[in-house]
Amino acid sequence: MVCRDCNVPLVFERQREPKPGFVNYQEILSTNNAADIAIIKSLFDSEGIVYYFLGEHFAFPIRLMVNKDQVEEARGLLKDLNASNDSADDSEETEET
C-alpha cells in the first residue's frame, strides 16, 4: 500500500529502537573553571569520547566522568590542556613528613 497523498509506501510496523547499553564511568579530572569545561566538551565531542560532568550545575568541584573504555584516550587528549583542576588519579598519593 502507498499513501494516496504522497505515493510513499506505508509502514505497517514501527521499527524498534535499540536499547541503550550500560556505560561504566570513571572520574579523571575535577575543576571549578567553566572555561576548562567548555574546552573539554568541545574536544571530547569532536573526538567521540563518551563523558559527562558530575555536578556541573550544582556542586563544586565539578567532576569529569569518562567511559572506562576511553579513559586512556581521554587522558591523552587532556595531557596538553593546562586546566586549573585537580586530576583524579588511580595512583596513591604519598605524604611528605
Image (cartoon, rainbow, N blue to C red):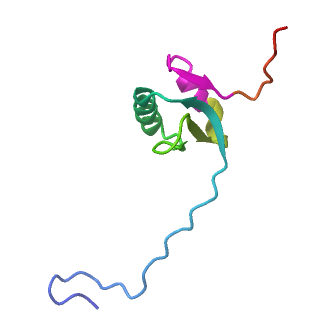
Towards the viewer: 72 or 5: 72
Residue 64 is situated, as x and y percent measured from the top left of the image, at: 56, 37
Q: Where is residue 76 in the image (x, y as percent from the top left)?
A: 58, 24
- Residue 84 colored in magenta in the image: yes
Kindly indicate the quadrant of the structure image that contains residue 71.
Answer: top right
Q: Which residue is drawn at 65% across and 30% down?
A: 72
- Locate the C terminus by quadrant: top right
Q: Which of 1 and 69 is in front in this view?
A: 69
Residue projecting furthest to the left: 5
User: For the magenta stretch, what is the residue range?
Assistant: 73-88
**Residue displayed at 58% across by 31% down:** 30
Q: In the picture shown, does residue 86 fall above or below 44?
A: above
Quick one: quadrant of the N terminus? bottom left
Residue at position x 51%, y 20% from top?
Answer: 84
Q: Does the magenta stretch include residue 25?
A: no
Left or right side of 4 for 22: right
The residue closer to the viewer here, 50 or 17, is 50
Residue 66: image quadrant is top right
Q: Which of 58 and 20 is in front in this view?
A: 58
Residue 9 in the image: state x and y as whole percent. 28, 83
